[in-house]
Image (spheres, helix red, strand yellow):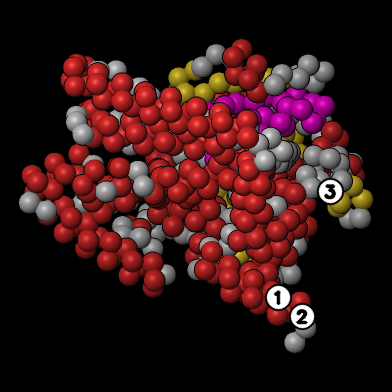
Amino acid sequence: MSPETIDRQVHAALARLTFGISPASLFEAYADWAVHLAMSPGKQAHLVQKAVRKSLKLANYARNCAQQGLTAANCIEPLAQDKRFSAPDWQRFPFNLMQQSFLLTQQWWHNATTEVPGVSRHHEDMVSFAARQMLDVFSPANFIATNPEVLETTLREGGANLERGARQFAADWERLIAGKPPVGAEAFVPGKDVAVTAGEVVYRNELIELIQYRPQTEKVHAEPVLIVPAWIMKYYILDLSPENSLVKYLVSRGHTVFIISWKNPDSADRDRSYDDYRRLGVMAALDHISQALPKRKINAAGYCLGGTLLATAAAAMARDGDDRLNSMTLLAAQVDFTEAGELTLFIDDSQVRFLEDMMWEQGYLDTKQMAGAFQLLRSNDLIWSQVLRLYLLGQQPQMTDLMAWNADSTRMPYRMHSEYLRGMFLNNNLARGQHMVDGRPINLADIRIPIFAIGTERDHVAPWTSVHKITFHPATEVTFLLASGGHNAGIVSPPGKDGRHYRVSTKEAGDRYRDPESWFAATPEQEGSWWPEWQSWLAAHSGQRVTPPAPPPSLGAAPGRYVLQR
């Protein structure tokens, strides 16, 4: 056995214990911070001053509470997205002192882990993130004795909430160990409850099934729509329950819709490359549509990683003079990874090599192995709020179609994911014009078709300021829309739901670039779902309506076989 093989096997075994996070990467970040802090007496003195001032603030707050009671003003307010202490009971003694002390401590540690002279930006972000995660564990909201909501519920119910929570925890743990979906997911089965828009599988190869949906109108737009989802997710996030289905929405408004359903790869697909996904995915689907509907240009849309792949294909097509695309839509998709958000916390050379060794052993990366990283990015919402609600308050889990879809996990091939992490996240090759297709580089600036790009306000996977960079690269008309919500819930935004809003504007070819902050300040907010805005844009960039295409030869009814693979 070679030394490299031994190292890879050790790293793979270690990765299973650390949830795929490289200990070396974490230690390097900590050492960078600790050494530079130790050599910065001015920063140390500043932190001591901060600690003294915060202690005095807390003491002054305690005195005000004793004098003014519940009317005393807080000495520190939580961040807007932090809802842990929003209940009125947190203003009662002693819980008010607990939450204020915690928030002051949290703020001090942010000061301690940032702006240390000499620490690299990446290491600073990692250390600050790690400190925040450790502090979140000890939040007073997470313990029975220090959470007034849990105490009140426990006293009122005589501890029944804790008994329900213990049973729920045991059931969840059993399902986790057995690899079963969470409770309630069985009510959302693809083909029965979700992914039920009528259609046919019209093409299949070793990587994709292409689904064509049946027309629901007497006339349809001449230009069909091809949707390219990410293979990190199953396609039916865009065809959930009928009332939440973007596919059904488009079909009901006269669009001929095709969508790619990716095969769920296994160890036999370990050497499937990023370019294989372009060739056997996007290009194979375009070839079939062009053969079925000759001389018709295609409106293509890509979601998340599927959008990155679509932009890759579009740039290669533009370079080669292939003009089959009529427009391109990017849904929460990045083409420039210089500011790719908090996910870059887990991306550096050490971390990528660690993941490669883990994938090398099994031939793929299971998205369950990535779930921990995604949950840590929003630990208050995805971890600790769930612990509070399910296990301490004893509330019953409420399953939705989106939550059930999220639990329907997939895998990503070893070679493809390694190429994606190194080529996009580490080297940013696509934006730099250094990504190679068929042995030659491609350039996003070659794309000349109209582009519609959608970001979402609370996206931790593809931050909207990163998605907005599409307005910087191609020399063409780019409409950018910023929707409320996050990476998934912001895209699944059907009309009629309360609390939805968006901003939208168009940058014509030749217009000056506007940075995200200037764009946001200058673009008015509009109420409602963004779906009608995009559908109107598609209609405006389409020709006259025509008779729907004849029913295609079918390989089976939608949703097909690949989406059912586990």
| Spatial separation of the CA atoms under disc 1 and disc 2 | 6 Å
Judging by the rendered image, the residue that carries numbered circle 3 is: 435
- Horizontal side, residue 311 vs residue 372: left or right: right
Image marks 3 and 1: residues in contact by CB distance under 8 Å: no
Q: Residue at x 58, y 71 (%)?
A: 14
Image marks 1 and 2: residues in contact by CB distance under 8 Å: yes
Type of residue at label 2? Pro
The span picked out in magenta is: 460-484
| Spatial separation of the CA atoms under disc 3 and disc 1 | 30 Å
Q: Is residue 208 visible?
A: no
Residue extending farthest to the bottom is 1
- Front in this rendered view, residue 341 or 492: 341
Secondary structure under the numbered disc 2 in the rendered image: helix
Sequence-first disc among 3 and 1:
1
Type of residue at label 3? His
- Horizontal side, residue 300 vs residue 410: left or right: right
Secondary structure under the numbered disc 3 in the rendered image: loop
Secondary structure under the numbered disc 1 in the rendered image: helix
Judging by the rendered image, the residue that carries numbered circle 1 is: 7
- Front in this rendered view, residue 357 or 109: 109
Is 279 included in the stretch rendered in magenta?
Answer: no
Q: Residue at x 70, y 80 (%)?
A: 6
Judging by the rendered image, the residue that carries numbered circle 2 is: 3
Q: Is residue 384 above or below residue 117?
A: below
